[in-house]
Image (cartoon, rainbow, N blue to C red):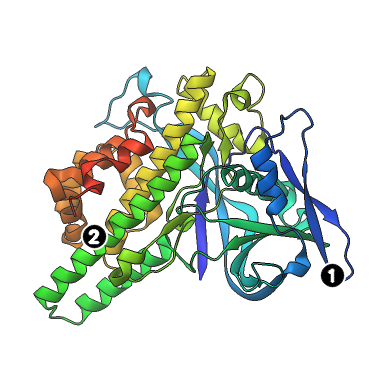
Amino acid sequence: MNLVAIHRVSFECVSRFSLKHRESGDGFSGCRIVNSRGRNRPIRRLHAVTASLITSADSFEVGRLIGSYGFMNVTSYTGLQSGSDFEYTSDDIGRLKSQDIGEGAVKIRLYQGRISQGPFRGTPVVFKVYPGQRAGGVEADMMAANELNAHSFLQSKSLPANLLLLVGGFETQLGEQWLAFRDGGKDSAADYAQTASEKTTRARSQGVWNPYEKEQMIKRRRNFVIKILQGAMKGLAFMHDNDRLHQSLGPSSIVLNTPAEREAIYLIPRLRDLAFSVDIRPSCLEEGATSGSLSEQLWRRANAAGAYTVFEKRAFGIADDIYEAGLLFAYLAFVPFCEAGVTDSLSLQRLLENTFRLDIEAVREYCLADERLEEAVKFLDLGDRAGWELLQAMLNADYRKRPMAEAVLSHRFLNGVV
């Protein structure tokens, strides 16, 4: 499994916690979690959460390598070029942007493992390994610290089932940051979608497809996709309610406890990859507090969209997450229902943003003409085109008109249409 995740370059305004090296004689070093900014007010429950994290390398056993993935950084944003068929006013500038994407330097490795000591001995975990500064540069350490900080903060709240649970971490003598998460499953939503697409390809290549079997399979697939979307949006709603942006939402950032469509009743999607999470509490959005190097592009785009005040920036950040969730929705509405190779995340994004400039009705007309996209169109047509309606709302070119996560969850497409 070799995942490639697409992430915006963003970082919260203050990294409150950091991993500190502690020597040990076995080739690993444990770590302790300390407050890195003395001016921050103490939060008792947050301190209790970080104190409960397992921070000794001796408390873990590391198993086999199970995967790796890199990050694609959005390095610049330029306005869309207008062609002979398109016109837009100055009001559109800053609301709708195209992306220049480059491969990031940070490469993440994933390992199986388990807790080997204490009351949670035997609990399976997945290690997320950030390279040291020598291999990944300072950005790798910043990402690891930010992910640790984000999980610690969110786990001080009433953590829902739809966020992956951080149980601890440590730093090696080589400077690698190892974060340990409770094992929520080996497959991501991207893995599921690709597997479903391959199954569709095999079924069609065999010639005759029993109509009843096809109908039942499509029903199961629709239900499974809806469950993934519901879980992802519940996790995102929780983050937004607690003043955190995800900023990395995509099919690779959702882990599934089961990829089997027949087991949808047991499915629990969980958000992961909070390395780019952004703190949007007012104190972090005040003048001069949003200048972190990894959040520079986010706030630059916010300014371009006319978001200058604290509350405008907060609204822009939330809407930006909703936009990413809209792209996730599009991915899951198309890829699992199409044959392998027909479409993917980047080609869908280009189709939506560059070709049709987020005119979802025009996208539907285009898809109707391609029989390979038939099942995806039928899926989004459910409930008198409820899927297209929700997709248009989430991908609205004006960030002010996008719905909140709770509103997405209550939309009829995610409630009873399937």
Q: Residues within 10 Å of mark 1 (few under 14, many from 20)?
A: few
Crowdedness of circle 2 by 10 Å Cα count: few (<14), some, many (20+)?
many
The amino acid type of the residue labelled 2 equals Arg
Would residue 264 appear left or right of 129 to someone viewing this image?
left
Q: In the rendered image, is residue 357 in sight?
A: no
The CA span between labels 1 and 2 is 49 Å
* Mark 1 vs 2, N-terminal side: 1
Residue drawn at x 33%, y 19% as measured from the top left: 89
Element type at marker 2? helix
Reply above or below: 198 against 326.
below
Near-viewer residue (405 or 343): 405
Residue occupying the point 46% across, 41% down: 238
Rendered image quadrant of residue 418: bottom left
Please state which of residues 320 and 113 is positioned toward the viewer in this rendering: 113
Q: Count up the numbered dots.
A: 2
Secondary structure category for the residue under label 1:
loop
Q: Is residue 194 above or below residue 85?
A: below
Q: State the image coordinates of residue 70 (x, y, percent, origin top left).
A: 58, 58
Amino acid type indicated by mark 1: Gly
Q: Nearer the viewer, residue 85 or 349?
A: 349
Return the mark for residue 385: none
Identify the residue at horizontal 51%, vertical 48% (top origin): 159
**Res 159 visible:** yes
Q: Nearer the viewer, residue 168 or 20?
A: 168
Find disc 1 in the rendering and name its residue: 27
Residue furthest out toward the front: 119
Locate residue 98, reporting x and y percent: 43, 37
Q: Position of residue 332 (x, y in %)?
A: 32, 56
Residue linked to disc 2: 222
